[in-house]
Image (tube, rainbow, N blue to C red):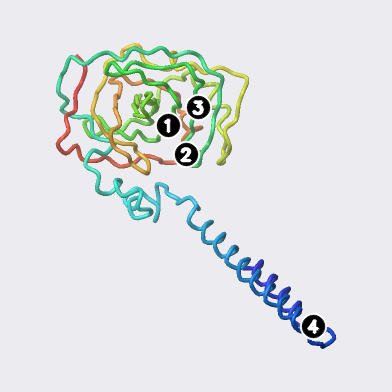
Amino acid sequence: MQEKELLLNYINNLLALKKPQNIRYKMKSFKNKFFIILTSVLLISFFSFGQEHHKKEHKVHWGYTGEYKPDNWSKLKPDYELCGNGTSQSPIDLVNPISSSLTSINSNYKPSLLNIINNGHTIQVNYSNGSYAMIDGQKYTLLQFHFHTPSEHTVNGKHFDMEMHMVHKDKDGNLAVVGILIKIGKENPNFSNIVKHISAHKSDAMDFDEIVDVNSILPGNKSFYHYYGSLTTPNCAEGVNWSVLTTHIEISKTQFDQFHNVMGNNNRPIQPLNKRFLLISE
Protein backbone atom coordinates (compact mmCIF):
# COMPACT_ATOMS: atom_id res chain seq x y z
CA MET A 1 0.00 0.00 0.00
CA GLN A 2 2.82 2.43 0.84
CA GLU A 3 4.50 1.83 -2.54
CA LYS A 4 1.26 2.64 -4.37
CA GLU A 5 0.79 5.93 -2.46
CA LEU A 6 4.37 7.02 -3.18
CA LEU A 7 3.91 6.19 -6.84
CA LEU A 8 0.66 8.16 -7.09
CA ASN A 9 2.25 11.19 -5.40
CA TYR A 10 5.15 11.05 -7.83
CA ILE A 11 2.75 10.88 -10.80
CA ASN A 12 0.68 13.82 -9.54
CA ASN A 13 3.82 15.89 -9.15
CA LEU A 14 4.85 15.11 -12.70
CA LEU A 15 1.43 16.02 -14.06
CA ALA A 16 1.40 19.28 -12.10
CA LEU A 17 4.62 20.60 -13.61
CA LYS A 18 4.05 23.84 -15.52
CA LYS A 19 5.88 24.47 -18.80
CA PRO A 20 5.71 27.19 -21.49
CA GLN A 21 2.48 26.98 -23.46
CA ASN A 22 2.75 26.53 -27.22
CA ILE A 23 1.05 24.19 -29.65
CA ARG A 24 4.04 21.97 -30.21
CA TYR A 25 4.73 21.72 -26.50
CA LYS A 26 1.06 21.04 -25.74
CA MET A 27 1.11 18.05 -28.12
CA LYS A 28 4.33 16.82 -26.60
CA SER A 29 2.99 17.43 -23.11
CA PHE A 30 -0.18 15.53 -23.93
CA LYS A 31 1.86 12.54 -25.15
CA ASN A 32 4.06 12.67 -22.06
CA LYS A 33 1.05 12.81 -19.75
CA PHE A 34 -0.58 9.94 -21.61
CA PHE A 35 2.61 7.92 -21.30
CA ILE A 36 2.85 8.73 -17.59
CA ILE A 37 -0.76 7.74 -16.98
CA LEU A 38 -0.41 4.49 -18.96
CA THR A 39 2.80 3.60 -17.13
CA SER A 40 1.14 4.40 -13.83
CA VAL A 41 -1.79 2.10 -14.53
CA LEU A 42 0.58 -0.72 -15.41
CA LEU A 43 2.72 -0.17 -12.31
CA ILE A 44 -0.28 0.03 -9.99
CA SER A 45 -1.64 -3.18 -11.55
CA PHE A 46 1.76 -4.78 -11.00
CA PHE A 47 1.84 -3.80 -7.32
CA SER A 48 -1.74 -4.98 -6.82
CA PHE A 49 -0.98 -8.31 -8.49
CA GLY A 50 2.16 -8.71 -6.40
CA GLN A 51 0.27 -8.14 -3.15
CA GLU A 52 -2.54 -10.48 -4.17
CA HIS A 53 -0.06 -13.09 -5.35
CA HIS A 54 1.76 -12.83 -2.02
CA LYS A 55 -1.50 -13.47 -0.18
CA LYS A 56 -2.22 -16.53 -2.31
CA GLU A 57 1.30 -17.87 -1.91
CA HIS A 58 1.31 -17.28 1.86
CA LYS A 59 1.55 -20.65 3.51
CA VAL A 60 -1.55 -21.56 5.47
CA HIS A 61 -0.78 -22.00 9.13
CA TRP A 62 -1.90 -25.18 10.88
CA GLY A 63 -1.19 -26.50 14.34
CA TYR A 64 -2.51 -28.50 17.25
CA THR A 65 -4.38 -25.93 19.34
CA GLY A 66 -7.01 -23.21 18.99
CA GLU A 67 -8.46 -22.39 15.59
CA TYR A 68 -5.64 -24.26 13.85
CA LYS A 69 -6.20 -27.58 15.69
CA PRO A 70 -6.67 -30.91 13.85
CA ASP A 71 -10.48 -30.70 13.96
CA ASN A 72 -10.24 -27.55 11.81
CA TRP A 73 -7.51 -28.58 9.37
CA SER A 74 -9.95 -29.38 6.58
CA LYS A 75 -11.40 -25.84 6.83
CA LEU A 76 -8.07 -24.04 6.55
CA LYS A 77 -7.41 -24.79 2.89
CA PRO A 78 -9.17 -26.70 0.07
CA ASP A 79 -6.09 -28.92 -0.32
CA TYR A 80 -6.64 -30.11 3.26
CA GLU A 81 -10.14 -31.49 2.67
CA LEU A 82 -9.02 -35.10 3.20
CA CYS A 83 -8.23 -34.19 6.81
CA GLY A 84 -12.00 -33.93 7.28
CA ASN A 85 -13.61 -36.31 4.80
CA GLY A 86 -10.91 -38.92 4.13
CA THR A 87 -11.85 -42.54 4.80
CA SER A 88 -8.33 -43.99 5.24
CA GLN A 89 -6.80 -41.61 7.73
CA SER A 90 -4.03 -41.98 10.32
CA PRO A 91 -3.32 -42.47 13.16
CA ILE A 92 -5.53 -45.33 14.36
CA ASP A 93 -5.96 -47.38 17.50
CA LEU A 94 -3.92 -50.57 17.15
CA VAL A 95 -6.45 -53.02 18.51
CA ASN A 96 -7.74 -56.44 17.41
CA PRO A 97 -5.23 -56.92 14.58
CA ILE A 98 -5.48 -59.89 12.24
CA SER A 99 -2.44 -62.18 12.41
CA SER A 100 -0.87 -62.52 8.97
CA SER A 101 2.27 -63.89 7.34
CA LEU A 102 3.53 -60.47 6.28
CA THR A 103 6.83 -60.02 4.48
CA SER A 104 9.48 -58.89 6.95
CA ILE A 105 10.82 -55.35 6.78
CA ASN A 106 14.39 -55.77 5.55
CA SER A 107 16.39 -52.61 6.07
CA ASN A 108 19.71 -51.38 4.75
CA TYR A 109 20.19 -48.29 6.88
CA LYS A 110 23.60 -46.65 7.03
CA PRO A 111 24.93 -44.07 9.49
CA SER A 112 24.17 -40.48 8.48
CA LEU A 113 25.65 -37.10 9.26
CA LEU A 114 23.32 -35.31 11.65
CA ASN A 115 21.04 -32.76 9.97
CA ILE A 116 18.29 -31.53 12.27
CA ILE A 117 15.48 -29.00 11.96
CA ASN A 118 12.78 -27.56 14.18
CA ASN A 119 10.12 -26.87 11.54
CA GLY A 120 7.64 -25.41 14.00
CA HIS A 121 5.61 -28.61 14.19
CA THR A 122 8.16 -31.26 15.14
CA ILE A 123 11.84 -32.05 15.56
CA GLN A 124 12.98 -33.67 12.33
CA VAL A 125 16.24 -35.41 11.45
CA ASN A 126 16.97 -35.48 7.71
CA TYR A 127 18.79 -38.61 6.62
CA SER A 128 21.63 -38.87 4.09
CA ASN A 129 21.01 -40.59 0.75
CA GLY A 130 21.71 -44.29 0.41
CA SER A 131 19.61 -45.84 3.20
CA TYR A 132 16.50 -47.82 2.39
CA ALA A 133 14.10 -50.54 3.52
CA MET A 134 12.31 -53.28 1.62
CA ILE A 135 8.67 -53.01 2.63
CA ASP A 136 6.10 -55.30 0.98
CA GLY A 137 8.86 -56.26 -1.45
CA GLN A 138 9.27 -52.65 -2.60
CA LYS A 139 12.37 -50.50 -2.09
CA TYR A 140 11.71 -47.33 -0.10
CA THR A 141 14.44 -44.76 0.53
CA LEU A 142 14.64 -43.31 4.05
CA LEU A 143 14.19 -39.53 3.88
CA GLN A 144 13.83 -38.40 7.48
CA PHE A 145 12.47 -39.25 10.89
CA HIS A 146 10.57 -37.02 13.31
CA PHE A 147 8.72 -37.17 16.62
CA HIS A 148 5.27 -36.73 18.18
CA THR A 149 4.41 -36.32 21.87
CA PRO A 150 2.40 -38.16 22.99
CA SER A 151 2.26 -41.03 20.50
CA GLU A 152 -0.16 -40.63 17.61
CA HIS A 153 -1.05 -44.32 17.39
CA THR A 154 -2.53 -45.93 20.47
CA VAL A 155 -2.47 -49.59 21.51
CA ASN A 156 -5.78 -50.78 22.93
CA GLY A 157 -6.72 -47.15 23.46
CA LYS A 158 -3.56 -46.17 25.36
CA HIS A 159 -0.97 -43.62 24.24
CA PHE A 160 2.77 -44.08 24.59
CA ASP A 161 4.81 -41.08 25.70
CA MET A 162 6.24 -40.43 22.27
CA GLU A 163 6.35 -41.81 18.74
CA MET A 164 9.03 -41.69 16.08
CA HIS A 165 8.08 -41.75 12.38
CA MET A 166 10.62 -42.91 9.79
CA VAL A 167 9.42 -41.54 6.45
CA HIS A 168 10.37 -43.41 3.27
CA LYS A 169 9.60 -42.89 -0.42
CA ASP A 170 9.84 -45.27 -3.39
CA LYS A 171 10.89 -44.40 -6.96
CA ASP A 172 7.28 -43.59 -7.89
CA GLY A 173 6.78 -41.17 -5.00
CA ASN A 174 4.73 -43.53 -2.81
CA LEU A 175 5.28 -43.15 0.92
CA ALA A 176 5.91 -45.74 3.60
CA VAL A 177 6.23 -44.81 7.27
CA VAL A 178 7.68 -46.99 10.01
CA GLY A 179 6.46 -45.97 13.46
CA ILE A 180 8.36 -46.67 16.68
CA LEU A 181 6.53 -46.26 19.98
CA ILE A 182 8.56 -44.71 22.80
CA LYS A 183 8.12 -44.96 26.55
CA ILE A 184 9.78 -43.00 29.36
CA GLY A 185 12.27 -45.25 31.12
CA LYS A 186 16.02 -45.68 30.90
CA GLU A 187 18.26 -43.11 29.27
CA ASN A 188 18.89 -43.93 25.62
CA PRO A 189 22.44 -43.03 24.52
CA ASN A 190 21.37 -43.31 20.87
CA PHE A 191 19.38 -40.09 21.28
CA SER A 192 22.21 -38.08 22.86
CA ASN A 193 23.41 -36.46 19.64
CA ILE A 194 19.86 -35.48 18.73
CA VAL A 195 18.60 -33.98 21.98
CA LYS A 196 21.65 -31.80 22.56
CA HIS A 197 21.14 -30.09 19.19
CA ILE A 198 17.39 -29.46 19.42
CA SER A 199 16.64 -25.82 18.66
CA ALA A 200 14.19 -24.21 21.06
CA HIS A 201 12.72 -22.17 18.20
CA LYS A 202 11.73 -22.76 14.60
CA SER A 203 14.89 -22.90 12.54
CA ASP A 204 16.44 -23.89 9.24
CA ALA A 205 18.03 -27.31 8.90
CA MET A 206 21.42 -27.40 10.63
CA ASP A 207 24.34 -29.71 9.88
CA PHE A 208 26.53 -31.09 12.65
CA ASP A 209 29.76 -33.01 12.44
CA GLU A 210 28.22 -35.95 14.27
CA ILE A 211 26.68 -39.26 13.29
CA VAL A 212 23.17 -40.61 13.78
CA ASP A 213 22.43 -44.28 13.10
CA VAL A 214 18.82 -45.49 13.10
CA ASN A 215 20.02 -49.10 13.37
CA SER A 216 21.00 -48.38 16.96
CA ILE A 217 17.64 -46.77 17.70
CA LEU A 218 15.39 -49.57 16.42
CA PRO A 219 14.35 -52.40 18.79
CA GLY A 220 15.65 -55.91 18.22
CA ASN A 221 12.18 -57.35 17.62
CA LYS A 222 10.95 -56.14 14.22
CA SER A 223 7.40 -57.56 14.35
CA PHE A 224 4.88 -54.93 13.31
CA TYR A 225 1.33 -53.80 12.79
CA HIS A 226 0.46 -53.00 9.19
CA TYR A 227 -2.29 -51.01 7.49
CA TYR A 228 -2.81 -48.39 4.77
CA GLY A 229 -3.50 -44.89 5.99
CA SER A 230 -2.48 -41.28 5.49
CA LEU A 231 -0.08 -38.57 6.51
CA THR A 232 -0.90 -37.45 10.05
CA THR A 233 -0.37 -33.78 9.12
CA PRO A 234 -1.95 -31.63 6.40
CA ASN A 235 -2.64 -32.35 3.58
CA CYS A 236 -3.50 -35.75 5.13
CA ALA A 237 -2.81 -37.50 1.80
CA GLU A 238 -3.93 -41.12 1.77
CA GLY A 239 -2.26 -44.23 0.33
CA VAL A 240 0.56 -44.27 2.90
CA ASN A 241 1.96 -47.72 3.71
CA TRP A 242 2.09 -47.86 7.52
CA SER A 243 4.12 -50.25 9.67
CA VAL A 244 4.21 -49.67 13.44
CA LEU A 245 6.64 -51.84 15.38
CA THR A 246 5.05 -53.85 18.18
CA THR A 247 8.09 -53.46 20.46
CA HIS A 248 8.64 -50.06 22.01
CA ILE A 249 11.92 -48.38 22.94
CA GLU A 250 12.76 -46.20 25.95
CA ILE A 251 14.19 -42.76 26.62
CA SER A 252 14.72 -41.03 29.95
CA LYS A 253 12.39 -38.42 31.41
CA THR A 254 15.08 -35.79 30.84
CA GLN A 255 15.40 -36.76 27.17
CA PHE A 256 11.63 -36.77 26.76
CA ASP A 257 11.36 -33.30 28.30
CA GLN A 258 13.92 -31.96 25.85
CA PHE A 259 11.56 -32.93 23.03
CA HIS A 260 8.29 -32.08 24.73
CA ASN A 261 9.38 -28.68 26.02
CA VAL A 262 9.97 -27.63 22.43
CA MET A 263 7.23 -29.49 20.52
CA GLY A 264 4.46 -29.51 23.10
CA ASN A 265 1.61 -31.91 22.32
CA ASN A 266 1.79 -32.46 18.56
CA ASN A 267 -0.30 -35.56 18.03
CA ARG A 268 -3.31 -35.85 15.76
CA PRO A 269 -6.34 -37.57 17.37
CA ILE A 270 -7.20 -41.17 16.54
CA GLN A 271 -9.06 -41.68 13.24
CA PRO A 272 -11.67 -44.39 12.51
CA LEU A 273 -10.47 -47.61 10.92
CA ASN A 274 -13.58 -47.76 8.71
CA LYS A 275 -13.42 -50.67 6.24
CA ARG A 276 -9.68 -51.19 6.44
CA PHE A 277 -7.84 -54.22 7.78
CA LEU A 278 -5.28 -53.94 10.56
CA LEU A 279 -2.73 -56.74 10.29
CA ILE A 280 0.04 -57.92 12.57
CA SER A 281 3.07 -59.96 11.49
CA GLU A 282 3.27 -63.51 12.77
> What is the CA distance from the residue labelled 4 to the residue labelled 2?
72 Å
Q: Residue type at mark 4?
A: Arg
Whole-percent x, y for residue 237 in the image? 32, 39
Q: Residue type at mark 2?
A: Met
Q: Nearer the viewer, mark 3 or mark 4?
A: 4
Q: Do the residues labelled 4 and 2 touch (CB within 8 Å)?
A: no
Whole-percent x, y for residue 6 in the image? 70, 70
Q: Are marks 3 and 2 in contact (CB under 8 Å)?
A: no
**Which quarter of the rendering shows the C terminus?**
top left
> What is the CA distance from the residue labelled 2 to the residue labelled 1?
9 Å
> Where is mark 1, residue-wise?
147
Q: Which of marks 4 and 2 is nearer the N terminus?
A: 4
Q: Residue 24 shows which numbered tag?
A: 4
Of residue 24 and residue 58, the one placed in the foreground of this image is 24
Asked which quadrant contains residue 175, the reply is top left
Instruction: Give the SS element for disc 3.
Output: strand
Q: Nearer the viewer, mark 4 or mark 1?
A: 4
> What is the CA distance from the residue labelled 3 to the residue labelled 4?
70 Å
Q: Which of marks 3 and 2 is in front?
A: 3
Q: Residue type at mark 1?
A: Phe
Residue sitting at 46 percent across and 37 percent down?
A: 122
**Which quarter of the rendering shows the N terminus?**
bottom right
> Where is mark 2, residue-wise?
263
Whole-percent x, y for residue 195 in the image? 53, 27
User: As drawn, which residue projects farthest toward the right?
Assistant: 20
Q: Earlier in the sequence, mark 3 or mark 4?
A: 4
Q: Residue 126 shows which numbered tag?
A: 3
Q: Are marks 2 and 1 in contact (CB under 8 Å)?
A: yes
